[in-house]
Image: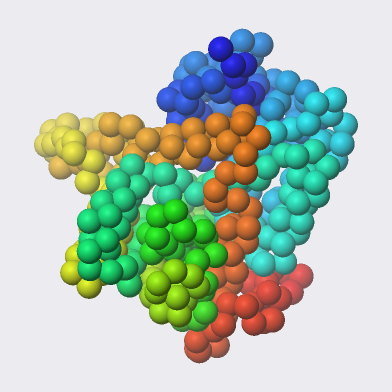
Amino acid sequence: MAAPLRIGFVGAGFIAGFHLESLQAVRDVEVRAVFSPGGAAGFLEAAARLGVASAAGVEALDSAEALAAHDEVDAIWICARNDTRVEVIEALERGCARRKAPLLGIACEKPLARNVAEAEAVCAAMDRIHAATGAHGAYLEDMLFAPGLARGKEVLWRRGAGVAGRPYLARASEEHAGPHSEWFWRPEIAGGGALVDMMCHSIEAARWLLTEPGAPRASLRPIAVSGSVANLKWVHEPYASQLKARFGGDLDWAANPSEDFARATITWRVESGPDAGREVLSETSSSWCYVGAGLRHEFQLLGPEYALDIDMSRTGVEVFFSRAVQGSVGEDLVEKQNAEQGLMPISPDEAAHYGYVGENRAFSRAFAAGRSPEPGFAAGLEVTRLLMATYLSASEGRVVDPFEAAVGSLRPFDPAG
């Protein structure tokens, strides 16, 4: 039996918890160490409780550099705040230089960075690490591994596109009532609002649905972006005051907002195959203004004689509690649940349903085998570019070429300009 892949985490918050849950279903992996500036007590407890800690336990380290230098860590998952991406990857680069045996891989959560310049710096550091050690980079986009999306795409392309021609329109939307953590509500830290937080999922998933199975990522090229952003709820009373009271301190979203709603239409050009030169579209939206039974997460893929519809809130399990039944916050049923009574969905296995199990299985196997997984850091850079193109389109009221210079230099919500 092969030795397990020993994983280290940078960051120990909400998303790292999802990864811990998913690792229960991934063979030949274990969690060996963690670095989290905010403390890792809950992470350490969860790793032990879920049975994913290494036999030696999970070691809490005092820096990302120390994590990368740890010779009992084979691969690293970056789950830290958006504003630390460049700092973290450069610390990992320094740590890799101190190792006896090379690191096998680094996986980074979405978004790759807050803007194109930072994303390019992250990719450059990963390229240097790969050149020096052979370690591969992976972009953690769970939606590409969600079982419903994967199966739906396979069937539609095989039975629909195989007979009637390629799909030409993908739609993806994600909405909920807003993030739990305070830093998401600080544009200078997160790099934006609902657009950066959620549309990164939708853009990448829509592109993937439109890409022919087996074709390279470069077979679709984005050529035009039209977008808009808005503040529909959280700048208005009583919600602005509620948000301020929830997090305390100096958080004042009404005075320093980014956006709680965003939409984008992207035109893609087919670059290869029999449809080369043809244009296809993706329509995406994201919002922190939706109040319902958990997340609203929907996908569509349309072609000349067929359609695919996926509603990820349909979990197949529901419960009903009358008003006589009162209890605590209902997120033990499904993420972002907004009620504790009435008819409510239950997700039997959220980590699998949203694709965390599939992505962590794929990436850990690729790292262990010395292969470069897909998507890689370059995918995260492209998504970041499209997010910035959406901001530019929204601010200037025009259709934007995602490769124009203004997109690369845009730094929305950066106090330094």
**Above or below, comparing residue 7 to residue 384 in the picture:** above
**Above or below, comparing residue 209 to residue 19 in the picture:** below
- Direction from residue 168 to residue 260 in the image, left or right: right
Q: Position of residue 375 (x, y in %)?
A: 55, 51
Q: Looking at the figure, which quarter contains the C terminus?
A: bottom right
- Direction from residue 322 to residue 282 in the image, left or right: right
State the image quarter where residue 404 is shown.
bottom right
**Above or below, comparing residue 171 to residue 324 in the picture:** below
- Direction from residue 257 to residue 345 in the image, left or right: left
Residue occupying the point 33% across, 32% down: 349
The one of 235 and 160 positioned closer to us in this rendering: 160
Residue occupying the point 44% across, 69% down: 273
Q: Looking at the figure, which quarter contains the N terminus?
A: top right
Residue occupying the point 37% across, 35% down: 352
Q: Is residue 221 visible?
A: yes
Q: Position of residue 30 (x, y in %)?
A: 58, 21
